[in-house]
Image (cartoon, coloured by chain):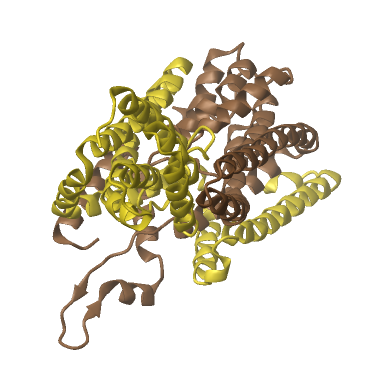
Amino acid sequence: MGFSAIQIILVFIFVFIVAIDQFDFLESLYQPIVTGAVIGAILGDLPTGLVVGGTYQLMTIGNMPVGGAQPPNAVVGGVMAAVFAISSGLDTTAAVGLAVPFAIIGQYMVTLLFTAMSPMMSVADKMAEKGDTKGIVRLNYLAMAILGLLFAVVCTAGLLGGAAMGEKLTALSEQYAWFMNGLSAAGGMMRFVGFAVLLRIMLSNDFWGIYFAGFALATIIGYIPELSGSALLLIAFVGIAMALYDFQTRCAMKSAGAGASVNGGDEDGI
Amino acid sequence: MAFNATHYNNLTPAKQLDKATLNKMVFRSLNLQASFNYERMQAGGWLYCILPGLEKIHADNKEDLEISMQHNLEFFNTHPFLVTFVMGIVLSLEQQKADIGTIRAVRVAAMGPLGGIGDAIFWFTLVPITAGITSNMAINGSLAGPILFLLIFNIVQFLCRFFLMYWSYNLGTKAIELLTANAKEFTRAASMLGVFVVGALTSNYGGTTINLVIENGDSPINIQSILDGVLPKLIPLTITLVLFALMKKKGWTPVMCIGLLLVVGILGGFIGIF
């Protein structure tokens, strides 16, 4: 089944938008239930699009991008499943199967982009030093445009190349699996740079114990699967109790010190 | 350098932010993750979101705007749908020209817990329920499925974003009067909470593990489980502390640290330990 130039352009534009939407904008247009219907409408088979979208949506419910983890990309997966179901007349399961290599490539692209954007933060630092507000805005829009373009190109290539393209991508992703593994490991470690920067600024010598206490509590709670959702909230309760106690004690010390003898007040230097 | 500045030059509180600016920032908050990256996560987007407010607040002092922009580019990660809560409270502190240490501590302390709450509300409750119902409508061929899904999800999302922005901005403005009397004590307590949260994040966000098994006949030795026996999350903790030491003692920049981690990661991927 061939596609008209207008259909290809519409798919390109639509994927560009939903690729951005997966992290920004409405963060809901990218869900397979929506993309299936829109791709169906563009390719002239809305009923199939609805069915594939709905089915794929049910599959992804247990597989949300929570806490920074990157499952095979649902945007590319949903779009390509609808494309294959309509163009090759496959049933939904088979179409979803064909879409998987594309979803994995989508996941790789996200990893690559998030890694490449890390050193860009020092460019942002320079802009901030100069008070370049327009630069910060441009940097953000640029990053969004790159994300949209990457995904639009992959999906358009899939639309034109069909399942054969999927096989090529699978071979490619297997060949470079070690590199992508290393890159996502590096990506997973980069947040420690962010933490270290915060610590360098916030961590005065008398707070070392507090840092390790936070680490210890989070690690203990981390071993209780039932608390995975509420872990940071529980940790905040303990942290707030501690900070509040410190605040109240010091305020009380200060007002006591102010009322007491001349020597008493100024000894609680930080 | 930003991290040396402890307070703004102009300490006169700025005018209250007007509704138009607050609304503009609510809409910008949609793109919080625009420049998401592994090092500072949403930091670039965060600064972009609050810039309209910062420009108004520090309109009379360019240096203050620069200081503010720099410290608002530090590591930031919270739930994208609840971010306006952090925005409101941080903007109220900026407007009152609070200590930079205080602003930073409040920002760090507020961002962590919201992640868990947001996941619970949106990804574990709202999406499964609405998507579950509307998907079956779609499978039965009804176009109402996707439309209903978008409507419900976005109504909840925008209610959250607008309500939290105004509520926390007003809350912060009211609270600050109580706090200025004990500003020093408050900064200390907030920093304490901030450091506690960063400690928790080191473990909670630290997923780095080693996938190395030494062949040993019938009982292969799994390095990661040995490390877990010593101290779970030992690797995230060690990396954070090593990076901290490199920056503090050796004067490394964040970019040098990223370069180091890239080399370690790709070499590790090549030998197969990740």
| A134 to the left or right of B25 | left
Write down the quadrant of residue A122 in the picture.
Answer: top left
Whether residue B42 is visible here, answered yes or no, is yes
Q: Residue at x 76, y 31 (%)?
A: B173
Q: Is residue A205 left or right of residue B226?
A: right
Q: Is residue B13 visible?
A: no
Percent coordinates x, y for residue B157 in the rendering: 63, 39
Q: Residue furthest bottom?
A: B218
Q: Nearer the viewer, residue B219 or A211?
A: B219
Q: Which residue is painted at 63% across and 16% down in the image? A: B56
Q: Which percent across, then down, holds residue B203?
A: 46, 60
Q: Quadrant of residue A157?
A: top left
Residue that appears at 37% across and 34% down: A43
In front of the other: B189 or A256: B189
Residue A134, placed above or below residue B110: above
Q: Residue B138 location in percent, x, y?
A: 53, 48
Closest to the observer, A200 or A156: A156
Residue A83 is situated, as x and y percent measured from the top left of the image, at: 33, 41
Q: How many marks do you count on the picture? A: 0
Q: Which chain is brown?
A: B
Q: Which quarter of the rendered picture does the N terminus of chain A lie within? A: top left
> Which chain has been coloured yellow in this picture?
A
Name the residue: 70% across, 37% down.
B159
Residue farthest top in this picture: B60
